[in-house]
Every structure is written in C-alpha cells, then in structure tokens.
Amino acid sequence: MTTKDAERWFGFSFADLETLRAFGLRSSGDHPVRTYDWGELVTLASHLRMRSGHRAAMRYWLRTLEGLSKSRMKYRIEVEAVVEDPDLTPLQVLGSDGRYTTVLTQSGRVSRQSWVSLELCTKAVTPMIAALLEEYSDIDHYFLPRALSNDATIYLKHRIADCRSFAYFLSSAARREGIPCRESWGLIVSYPYSTPHAWVEFLIDGTWVAIDVFMARALREWGLSDLPLLELATLLGSLYSRWSATPVPFACPADTVRHTTFRTSRMTTGVEIPTALAGEY
C-alpha cells in the first residue's frame, strides 16, 4: 500500500506514517514510492479510530450515576477469566481488596467475587486542581497500541491518549505542581457489567477523590452527556473502584487468559438484583 493509498483509505498523513515507521511499521522503498504493510495499517487504524466500543457501557455508567443520586449502593462483581488450557489450574484472580487469591479452574474458567459500595461524590474541587484539569481537558480518548501509548510525543503533539497513558501524564503534571495525587487501576462499576480503567485520584480534605476529565470529555464529545465537564468528571469518579496502584492483570498468568468478564449485580435491602448481561474486554 502506497503513501497515497494509506491517506485515502485510513487518513494517515505522510507525517503520521513517518512517526509510525519510527515505532516499527514495516515499509519498503523510499518516499514518494514507499509502500507499507496493509495488514499493519488496518490494525493501527482500528486501534486509533475505534473511539471505544464501550458506548453501551457509558450509558450504563450514566444510569448507575442516576441510581447513586438517590442512595448509596452496593454491588457484587464477579471477575471471570476464560483460559486457553481447560486443564490449567490454579490461577491467581484479583479482588477489590487489591490482593490475588488462588482459584482452581473449572471447565476452562476461573472466577472470584468481590463487593464494593458506592456513593455520589460531593467534594468541591480546589482551584489548583481545576486549573490543572482544564489544561488537560482537550485530550481525546483512543485505544492505542502499547508502543504508541508509552510515547510522550504522540500525547503531546497529537493530544490523544488511552486511559493508562493519560493517568501517567496527568499524575506526573500534578506532582510537578505540588498537587497530592495517585494513579489508580480498577473498575468503573456499573450494572450489569463493569469496565477496567486507569485514572488519577486527588487528595481533597483528607480523602482520595477520583476526578476523570478524560472519560468525561469522551462522554460529552460522543453526545452522551451535556453536563459541565468538571461536574461530570467528579460525578463519574463516584463509580470508580480502586483495585491497584498500577495496571495489573485481573487474572494471571496473563498469557494464559483469553478474555475476562466483569459481571456486576446490584444489592439492595439485602436482595440481589440478577445480572442480565455480561461484558467482555
């Protein structure tokens, strides 16, 4: 595929292709007759333009927030992993306490239950934090290949990131400003399924508060909410359950796991509301 074809079919400019070549995109020949591997361009285009297949999940987030506006809620989360080898046993499965528990496989699956309680965040954001978040509120959400996710040039020049890279760069900026913060990894909790995510929490009045302008911007840009950005970012953080300080597998060894689901059920007055759907990531 030529440079012209890459721009026509996938929207990659010459500068984009040169950046991707620096990170290992295969090509042959010299510009302007250089050609590229079609399969790799398809894969990269899918990563960079997917914009998130989780629009349905985002609607569940907003519905869960609506429930939290009425009362505190408790949720049961079942982390279930499907493994490559049905006879493989045991595996380590992460829980909401941040610890791994050894679980035996059954029919090629392992699962572990955790319970989390959520309530709507009402903390006021400090002016210093608000100013920092405003500075980083123009970053677009994309699913990035790991090599691009870890590259500051992609983030700074093109203003795109995934949740892991955004959390890293935002927390680094906060520390430079002297703002107490911490990176977090866990789930955006919602019924009927939860979503793995990375974010930043800020210390406000002695409490760690998740404020996520990154996903709030995505919700607004994709027409799912018209709340002011900072208000939405603070409310959205009410759904976040921190399971680790850094991104780690929910089940390991990770290379034995095909996919992981996070079935989530609401608990109310001691009665569990059955889960209707399961999300796969």
Image (tube, grey):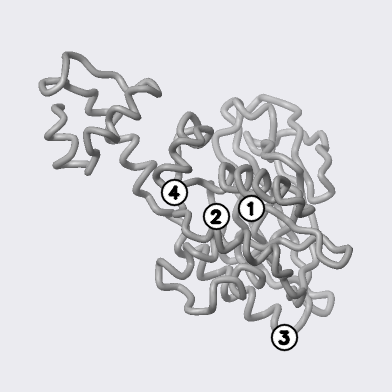
Relative to residue 143, is residue 198 drawn left or right?
right
- Residue furthest to the right in view is 206
Q: Nearer the viewer, residue 134 or 122?
A: 134
Dot 4 surroundings within 10 Å: few (below 14), some, or many (20 or more)?
some
Residue type, mark 1 in image: Phe
Q: Label 4, label 1: how many angstroms apart (C-alpha)?
A: 30 Å
Tell me the number on the disc at residue 70.
3
Residue 182, position in %: x, y? Answer: 76, 49
User: Residue under circle 4?
Assistant: 159
Q: Position of residue 81 (x, y in %)?
A: 64, 40
Q: Depth check: 157 or 257 in front?
A: 157
Contact flag, marks 3 and 4 (Cβ < 8 Å): no
Which residue position holds label 2? 279
**Can I make out residue 265 in this image?**
no
Q: Earlier in the sequence, mark 4 or mark 1?
A: 4
In front of the other: label 2 or label 4? Answer: 4
Q: Kindly check if marks 2 and 1 are in contact, taking CB atoms under 8 A apart as contact.
A: yes
Is 279 left, or right, of 180 in this rendering?
Answer: left
Can residue 196 be seen here? The reply is yes
Residue depicted at 55% across the width and 58% down the height: 135
